[in-house]
Image: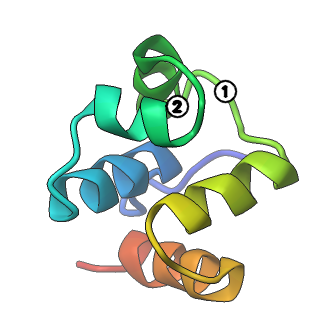
Amino acid sequence: MLQDAKDKSFGEYIKHLRKCNGMTQVDLAVNLNSNYQNISSLERNKFGPSLAYLYKLADAFNMSIVEFIQGFEDFKNQK
């Protein structure tokens, strides 16, 4: 499915959450037991995360998976 130009991407959402939480890509990567290149690729929409990775991301931002997904829906529809 093509993304509507007005919508914000999932990668932008991750970057937004990361910055709002005062984290660098390295900080988030360490929290996820990953590396900063993966975080960079995620923020540039180079891959779509698995369901398990979504749960890890939500946990890294101290959110439930429901809050995380709803937050993305709200974020991408902001004007």
User: Foreground: 6 or 13?
Assistant: 13
Q: Which residue is depicted at the point 48% across and 81% down?
A: 71
Q: Which residue is depicted at the point 83% across and 43% down?
A: 50
In the rendered structure, are the residues bearing label 2 and label 1 in contact, judged by CB atoms less than 8 Å apart?
Answer: yes
Please determine whether, in this image, residue 49 is positioned above or below residue 64: above
Residue type beneath disc 1? Phe
The picture quadrant where one finds residue 70 is bottom right
Please determine whether, in this image, residue 17 is positioned above or below residue 69: above
Marks 2 and 1, the one that precedes in the sequence: 2
User: Foreground: 51 or 10?
Assistant: 51
Callout 1 crowding tier (Cα within 10 Å): few <14, some 14–19, many ≥20: few
Kind of element beneath mark 2: helix
Task: Name the side, left or right, on which 62 lies relative to 55.
Answer: left
Residue type beneath disc 2? Leu
Q: Which residue is depicted at the point 50% across and 17% down?
A: 35
Q: Mark 1 points at which residue?
A: 47
Q: Residue furthest right?
A: 51
Callout 2 crowding tier (Cα within 10 Å): few <14, some 14–19, many ≥20: some
Q: Whole-percent x and y of residue 75?
A: 38, 75
Task: Name the side, left or right, on which 1 lies relative to 37.
Answer: right
Q: Quadrant of the C terminus?
A: bottom left
Q: Whole-percent x and y of residue 74?
A: 44, 84
Q: Name the residue under label 2.
A: 42
Please determine whether, in this image, residue 28 is positioned above or below residue 76: above
Q: Which residue lies furthest to the top in this view?
A: 37
Please determine whether, in this image, residue 65 is positioned above or below residue 4: below
Task: Name the side, left or right, on which 74 lies relative to 78.
Answer: right
Q: Real-space Cα distance between discs 2 and 1?
A: 6 Å
Kind of element beneath mark 1: loop
